[in-house]
Image: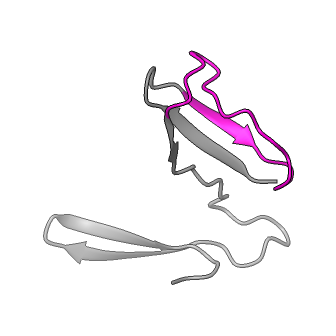
Amino acid sequence: MPIYEFKCLKCNECFEILVISSEDSVEMRCPACGAEDFERILSCASYSMNGGAGSGPGVKSQTRNCSGGSCSTLEIPGPSR
């Protein structure tokens, strides 16, 4: 059941639409102003940065010196490109 996020191009309201089935008809209107002119936006992901018991490998942090001071890189477990 994917949740899609949209931004209304008329009133700038951000809202979500839950799609339960690909065969369902979903009303595609801004809940604030009723406009049908909007764009899909990139959703934020939820990820726990500290692993708990049984959560598998956690995030690894690598810190190194850069020209602007120090830089950190986070390696989040999961598929990569």
Q: Quadrant of residue 77?
A: bottom right
Q: Quadrant of residue 32?
A: top right
Q: Is residue 71 left or right of residue 45?
A: left
Relative height, residue 49 to residue 5 (above, below): below
The prevailing secondary structure element of the residues shown in magenta is loop
Residue 2 horizontal/vertical position (percent)? 75, 53
Residue 60 horizontal/vertical position (percent)? 54, 76
In this view, the residue in front, 50 or 41, is 41
Q: How many marks?
A: 0
Picture residue at 63% right of the left edge, 28% below the top: 29
In this view, the residue in front, 70 or 73, is 73
Residue 63 horizontal/vertical position (percent)? 37, 74
Residue 20 forms part of the magenta stretch: yes
Q: Is residue 75 left or right of residue 27?
A: left
User: Furthest-left residue in view?
Assistant: 67
Magenta range is 14-37
In this view, the residue in front, 25 or 11, is 25
Residue 79 horizontal/vertical position (percent)? 62, 82
Relative height, residue 14 to residue 74 (above, below): above
Relative height, residue 73 to residue 32 (above, below): below
Picture residue at 65% right of the left edge, 21% below the top: 31
Picture residue at 70% right of the left edge, 78% below the top: 57
Q: Is residue 7 left or right of residue 73?
A: right
In this view, the residue in front, 9 or 44, is 9
Q: Is residue 21 left or right of residue 37?
A: right
Picture residue at 67% right of the left edge, 58% below the top: 48
